[in-house]
Amino acid sequence: MVKMLICYYSRSGNTKAMAYMIADGARKADVDVDVKKVSEVSPADLLGYDCIIFGSPTYYGTCAAELKLLIDKSVKYHGKLAGKVGGAFASCGILGGGCETTVAQLLEACLIHGMIIIGDTEGSHYGPVSVEKPNKSIEKICIDYGKRLGELTKRLH
Ligand SMILES: Cc1cc2nc3c(=O)[nH]c(=O)nc-3n(C[C@H](O)[C@H](O)[C@H](O)COP(=O)(O)O)c2cc1C
């Protein structure tokens, strides 16, 4: 069974809720999913997964420092994450508050690691985003995203 890690940072629970919604979707694709706070993930842990999805609140238009620190420390394994599937999601406080810049920042890191990312022709093109608490329509986007990335990972691995 392919393995997916959903690694998130969350202070007030919005990003965490999205992480568990994405995990529900991935389980529909029969993927073995771990959902972990970034504080529970070491750079070496990333090696053990076929798909890694990062989630963060938007802080001044970028990801939380805690997540950026993990990404920066992952340079120790530069080249070893190549070929894995990558993904990202974010929450923010207001519409236009920078959710998509946060997702793009996380996807850029995945690309620099040589990971495979996929866009979406509908809805959240870059990855799921939510203004504060995810509502029912964001929940569906998150579930579909987890399932899609799970299915892609299964096709590739
Ligand atoms: C330090 C800090 C910076 C923030 N910067 C932004 C921002 O630039 N744009 C925005 O829309 N929301 C911003 N917010 C709001 C959070 O992104 C938003 O409340 C988010 O849903 C929190 O996610 P969480 O519940 O997972 O912690 C900021 C919040 C904090 C604490």
Image (cartoon, rainbow, N blue to C red):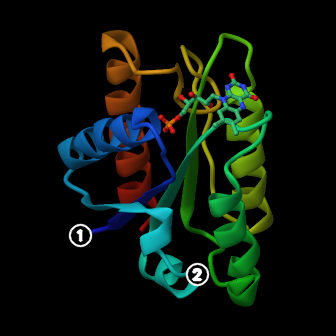
For disc 2, the neighbor class at 10 Å (few under 14, some 14 to 19, many from 20) is: some
70 to 128, vertically: above or below: below
Q: Which tag, 2 or 1, sits closer to the chain's start?
A: 1
> Going 75% across and 26% down the picture, which residue do you hit?
98
User: Farthest front residue?
Assistant: 12
Residue 43's disc is: 2
Name the quadrant containing residue 34: bottom left
Name the quadrant containing residue 142: top left
Q: Is residue 123 left or right of residue 29?
A: right
At which x and y percent is residue 131?
54, 17
Q: Which residue is mark 1?
A: 1
> Going 78% across and 52% down the picture, which residue do you hit?
108
Please say if the residues under marks 2 and 1 sit with CB atoms less than 8 Å apart: no
Q: Amino acid at mark 2?
A: Pro
In the image shown, does 64 or 82 lie closer to the viewer?
Answer: 64
Name the quadrant containing residue 14: top left
Quadrant in the picture for the N terminus: bottom left
Helix, strand or loop status at disc 2? helix
